[in-house]
Image: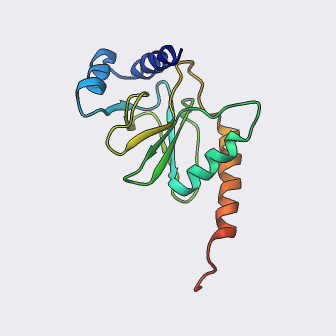
Amino acid sequence: MPDVMWMQGVEWLAAAASDPRACKREWDQGAGTVLMEAGRFWDVLSVPEQLGLLALDILWNDPLRAPGPTLVDTASRRVGFFLPPDPASRWVGSGLRHAGKGSWVAVPPPYRAARFLEWLIPPDGTGDLHTAVPLELALQRANGTLAVLAPPPGG
């Protein structure tokens, strides 16, 4: 059954591209990443890597809901959480970047890494995404943990 899940993830993700066929061809035969416009099927909240990995770990502890698609960029050391499009959303915090309508995101195929981009949680084709409130709470908890672990100023 994993093949079915991968194919559903590919179809779901490629549907966000302006040309889904060209997108899948680029994933298979090209550099492996495709620029996709955010704001139509999903937005992406990009956070510093350490914060994002800790928040993702917190989200995994919710027995009622698995986290949504999550991408890591190992070159820029950032984690991207895929959320429902919300043109009115305002994410405020140090290092947070919200990609909505008019923003473009480099996306690898769900079945493999491409250069510095890799899915921590690939899309499964169901359309399930992160939801804003649990993600915000997880980021707040993760930020609190990082603040406790940070060395004291001047130390």
Total residue callouts = 0
Q: Which residue is painted at 25% across and 34% down in the image?
A: 31
Q: Residue furthest left?
A: 30
Q: Is 137 placed left or right of 76 in the picture? A: right
Q: Residue furthest front?
A: 1
Which quarter of the picture shows residue 143? Answer: bottom right
Quarter occupied by the N terminus? top right
Q: Looking at the picture, how far across and down is residue 126, in whole percent?
A: 57, 18
Q: Is 67 placed left or right of 101 in the picture? A: right
Nearer-the-camera pick, 32 or 4: 4
Nearer-the-camera pick, 56 or 139: 56
Q: Residue furthest bottom?
A: 154
Q: Looking at the picture, how far across and down is residue 53, in whole percent?
A: 57, 50
Which quarter of the picture shows residue 22? Answer: top left
Q: Looking at the picture, how far across and down is residue 96, in whole percent?
A: 52, 52
Q: Please say if 155 is above or below 75.
A: below
Q: Which residue is painted at 58% across and 55% down in the image?
A: 51
Which quarter of the picture shows residue 15? Answer: top left
Quarter occupied by the C terminus? bottom right
| Residue 92 visible, this angle | no
| Residue 140 visible, this angle | yes
Q: Is 62 placed left or right of 35 in the picture? A: right
Nearer-the-camera pick, 69 or 103: 69
Q: Looking at the picture, how far across and down is residue 24, in whole percent?
A: 32, 20
